[in-house]
């Protein structure tokens, strides 16, 4: 039991109890009167036994009841309360976990975050009871933490300020990291006013942690004189499956198509069957049923290892930008990790350099391709560029019946001339060849019919172990791919224009298209690296972009029009999911959307609440938040006081009536 205002009660007792007793010690002073007889005044003779101003204190039921009533009133003023776990005076710091796992809905239909706020509110009421006779010098601070920590309310004794600050805490989808919160607590509890650096306070504050205990950075942290109470929210048995990651790529042989991959995780101890939906721009395109294996325990570390399943969706055509989402259609305790999205840009257009002795056919074929830029150069012009140390910004180089002096560092196509590399070695020529076979599944020969091709003359070459024969002639290789210094190249040992009948076939144009797309897009990352909560969102927009408006996954809208469109930044990002930045091009008035996808940290999907928090050598056992309630006893004391006064009034009236 604790007393909120004990000294007020002691002062009241010291003033009122002696006064009550004094009333029973004092003798009534009456004036002397002459009467004829005292026979009828026998009941009054007891008051005349002493002439002194004070009389002897006798047993009196009314005095006892009045003392009891006064004692109840004094107890009410002292405000007794039944105290359980929690702070015990001085300064208290409430640490509120707002990480992604706090969104698990397993506390009587509420999320853990809602339960934590409710328990913290009860703790504030306990520490700052207020009321008619409230007082005390309790001071409380509130710190919320996720990826980083934030002081929500500095030390104050105002219950209303604390409750308002508590209501303003919002959720984050970041990890639960407590180190920053402990550092802030130490700094401000040592000196609650940072401006007064010469006034340190040695006494450490009491820390009350409201969390599910899924804290990621406990290793290496210790308490330094603080007392910590861990009020746990959530249970240790959570039904949860999650989309661990999503990725996409465009097949090099079909750049207009997109192939989506999803990694799924099951955190339950049993096998789970769920439907997985693929959506494009909010429209469902595929639904797959998958069976996820059960989670297991790591026998060494003891942690939970989720059951994993990878899913590949059938490639679909998408020749423009799109928002792709993979979502689980099964309800579980943690909804925030049931979906993951990404932004897929349109296929990248290539910049190609063509080095040719002014031959028209290859140039016309290349001009007909969908390229961002085609730079046509003579061999002399190309060598001048390389001699000047300017390698250009091309994605692919095509050497038409010419060979450079040095091997380029850009993926290249060599038509009829041996490249200057040790990966292929020419040792002669062969005439009159037909196609014996080829790697028909290789991207450069997709949709190319090679059977009608006849080669009049070709170089005989020997490839290294890094070379692959794509097309085999009757006298040797006719087409090879090889890797030089990490770059892949294509080499045809014959001149398609001068030494074969390929120009009269439809396959030559298809071959050149396949080869440029294969080399230009090989190794491309289809999507940008996804951000994690806590990072900053950065967008590079056109210089004439105006009316910049950012919409977060929660629907909040932020006006960023004051920022430079060349580099728009906002953060730190708190929520996972799709962030949309809308802007208008002032020149055309056309509206555009820019998207950024933020992924949820996978560690937050392991959401089973911990039984304890370990800091150094200390193990702090959990206390269920909200399980302990602090009941004030002063209303009962006032009620007892009123009952006793009623009894005293009834006895007094009975005695008066008997006289």
Image (cartoon, rainbow, N blue to C red):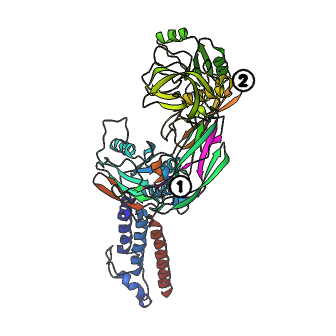
Q: Give percent across and percent down for residue 495.
A: 58, 20
Q: Give percent across and percent down for residue 82.
A: 40, 66
Residue 46 counted in the magenta span? no
Q: Give percent across and percent down for residue 532.
A: 49, 41
Identity of the residue drawn at 44% across and 21% down:
421
Position of 290 relative to 42 (above/below): above
371 relative position to 613: left or right: right
Q: Nearer the viewer, residue 187 or 409?
A: 409
How far separated are the C-alphas under marks 1 and 2?
Answer: 44 Å
Q: Which mark is residue 334?
A: 1
Position of 599 relative to 569 (above/below): below
Position of 627 relative to 37 (above/below): above
Q: Nearer the viewer, residue 605 or 13?
A: 605
Report the magenta residues as a range. Answer: 305-334
Q: Nearer the viewer, residue 658 or 4?
A: 4
Q: Which residue is mark 2?
A: 588
């Amino acid at each position: 039991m604790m007393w909120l205002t004990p000294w007020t009660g002691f002062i009241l007792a010291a003033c009122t109890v002696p006064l009550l007793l004094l009333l029973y010690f004092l003798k009534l002073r009456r004036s002397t009167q002459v009467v004829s007889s005292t026979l009828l005044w026998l009941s009054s003779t007891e008051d005349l036994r002493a002439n002194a101003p004070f009389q002897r204190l006798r047993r009196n039921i009314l005095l006892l009841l009045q003392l009891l009533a006064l004692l109840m009133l004094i107890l009410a003023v002292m405000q007794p309360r039944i105290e359980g776990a929690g702070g015990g005076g001085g300064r208290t710091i409430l640490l509120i976990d707002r990480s992604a796992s706090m969104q698990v809905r397993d506390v009587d239909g509420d999320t853990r975050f809602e339960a934590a706020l409710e328990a913290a509110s009860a703790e504030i009421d306990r520490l700052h009871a207020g009321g008619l006779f409230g007082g005390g010098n309790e001071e409380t601070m509130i710190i919320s933490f996720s990826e980083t920590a934030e002081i929500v309310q500095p030390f104050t004794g105002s219950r209303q300020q604390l409750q308002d600050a508590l209501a303003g805490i919002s959720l984050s989808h970041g990890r639960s990291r407590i180190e920053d919160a402990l550092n802030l607590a130490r700094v401000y509890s040592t000196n609650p006013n940072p401006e007064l650096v010469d006034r340190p306070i040695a006494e450490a504050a009491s820390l009350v942690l409201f969390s599910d205990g899924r804290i990621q950075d406990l290793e290496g942290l210790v308490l330094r004189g603080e007392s910590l109470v861990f009020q746990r929210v959530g249970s240790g048995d959570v039904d949860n499956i999650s989309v661990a990651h999503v990725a996409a790529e465009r097949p090099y042989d079909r750049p207009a198509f997109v192939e989506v991959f999803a990694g799924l995780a099951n955190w339950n101890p049993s096998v789970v069957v769920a439907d997985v939906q693929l959506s494009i721009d909010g429209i469902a395109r595929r639904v797959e049923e998958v069976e996820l294996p059960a989670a297991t325990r790591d026998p060494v570390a003891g942690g939970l290892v989720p059951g994993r399943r990878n899913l590949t969706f059938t490639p679909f055509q998408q020749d423009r930008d799109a928002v792709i989402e993979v979502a689980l259609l099964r309800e579980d305790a943690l909804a925030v990790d049931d979906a993951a999205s990404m932004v897929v840009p349109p296929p990248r257009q290539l910049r190609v350099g063509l080095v040719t002795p002014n031959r028209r056919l290859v140039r016309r074929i290349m001009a007909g391709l969908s390229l961002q830029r085609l730079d046509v150069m003579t061999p002399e012009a190309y060598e001048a560029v390389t001699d000047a140390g300017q390698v250009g910004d091309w994605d692919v180089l095509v050497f038409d019946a010419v060979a450079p002096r040095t091997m380029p560092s850009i993926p290249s196509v060599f038509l009829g001339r041996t490249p200057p590399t040790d990966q292929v070695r020419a040792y002669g020529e062969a005439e009159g060849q037909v196609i014996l076979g080829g790697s028909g599944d290789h991207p450069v020969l997709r949709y190319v019919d090679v059977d009608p091709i006849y080669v009049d003359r070709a170089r005989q070459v020997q490839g290294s172990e890094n070379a692959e024969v794509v097309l085999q002639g009757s006298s040797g290789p006719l087409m090879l791919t090889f890797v030089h210094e990490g770059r892949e190249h294509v080499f045809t040992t014959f001149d398609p224009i001068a030494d074969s009948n390929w120009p009269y076939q439809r396959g030559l144009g298809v071959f050149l298209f396949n080869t440029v797309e294969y080399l230009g897009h090989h190794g491309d990352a289809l999507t940008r690296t996804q951000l994690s909560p806590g990072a900053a969102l950065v967008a590079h927009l056109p210089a004439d972009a105006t009316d910049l408006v950012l919409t977060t996954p929660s629907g909040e809208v932020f006006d960023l029009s004051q920022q430079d469109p060349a580099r728009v930044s906002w953060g730190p990002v708190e929520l996972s999911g799709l962030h949309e930045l809308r802007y208008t091009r002032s020149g055309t008035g056309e509206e555009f959307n820019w998207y950024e996808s933020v992924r949820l940290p996978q560690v937050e999907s392991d959401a089973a609440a911990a039984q304890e928090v370990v800091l150094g050598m200390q193990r702090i056992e959990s206390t269920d938040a909200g399980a302990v309630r602090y009941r004030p006893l002063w209303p009962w004391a006032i009620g007892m006081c009123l009952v006793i006064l009623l009894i005293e009034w009834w006895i007094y009236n009975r005695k008066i009536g008997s006289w």
